[in-house]
Image: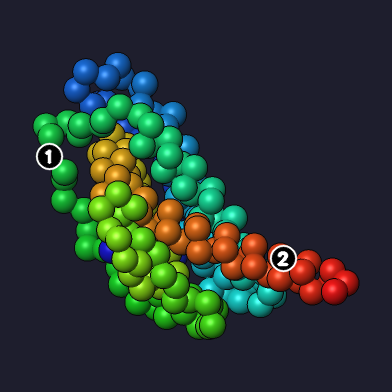
Amino acid sequence: MSEPDGGREPNVGLEPGGAGPPGVAAGSWRPLADRVAANAGDFLEGLAALRRGEGAQEEIVPLLLLEVAQVMLAGAQLGASREVIPPGNIEPKVAADPDLDGLRAALADLLVGCDEYAEIFDPYRDTAPSSFRLSDDIAAVAADLIHGLRHYQAGRAAEALWWWQYSYVNHWGTHGGAALRALHAIVAHASLDVAEEDVPG
């Protein structure tokens, strides 16, 4: 899974079509699919802007914090929704996902000095922290969002919604949540450490 072919940013303005999931009234899932598609497009556009060098170095982490927080809100809506089942309970084939190594490398360059961090992968099962990289986490989120956008742009909004929901629970939600916590920690340390230095001893 990767960024769109040729590095183009995804067009999320296409109208979805097809029937809704079994047992769901036609169109009742459409508003959520449209919102997630828009959030996904905004997230990918924000990453592309950072990759182009838009934004000062000191703005990189705060901007990533904002982008990840916004797309995780879309993920929370998916997690709080009832399970979506695609028509026929089968995922149609989509074009091969582009390579995201370029995005991952660009993020690693932007996050030199704070890319790697420690995180408890599953707070209910793991007892020791594991090493994570923000560049890997953000690229993983982008990959799953792009895969769903391929369904959405093909007029299969129900399948897109199913994929986003399924992969949120199983993959990109974990990476996005971990990245959000790490980015928040960087911003918090930057603010609190300065505040402590300003306090007279």
The relative height of residue 5 versus residue 79 in the rendered view (above or below) is below
Q: Most extreme residue toward the right, as rendered?
A: 200
- Say how many tags the image has: 2
In the rendered image, the vertical position of residue 119 relative to residue 164, given as above or below = below
Residue under the image location 36 percent in, 22 percent down: 27
Residue 186 locus on image (x, y percent): 59, 68
Between 130 and 161, the one lying in front of the other is 130
Residue 26 as seen in the image, left or right of residue 22: right
What residue sits 43% from the left and 35% below the top?
77
Which of the two residues, 98 or 115, is positioned nearer the viewer here? Answer: 115
In this rendering, the label closer to the viewer, 1 or 2: 2
Measured in 3D between alpha carbons, the distance from the residue under mark 1 to the one under mark 2, in whole angstroms, is 48 Å
Q: Quadrant of the C terminus?
A: bottom right
Q: Which residue in the structure is indicated by mark 2? A: 191
Depth order, front residue of 167/158: 167
Q: Residue at 59% of width from left, 55% of height from top?
A: 66
Residue bearing mark 1? 90
**Amino acid type, label 1:** Ile
Provide residue 119's location: percent of width, then percent of height.
Answer: 40, 64
In the foreground, 198 or 56: 198
Mark 1 vs 2, N-terminal side: 1
Residue in the image at 37% along x and 37% along y: 78
Q: SS at mark 2?
A: helix
Which disc is residue 36 wearing? none
- Which image quadrant is residue 142 in? bottom left
Q: In the image as oriented, which residue stretches furthest toward the front? A: 201
Q: Residues within 10 Å of mark 2 (few under 14, many from 20)?
A: few
- Amino acid type at image mark 2: Ser
Whether residue 13 is visible to the viewer of this picture, yes or no, is no
Relative to residue 45, is residue 1 drawn left or right? Answer: left
Is residue 2 shown above or below 164?
below
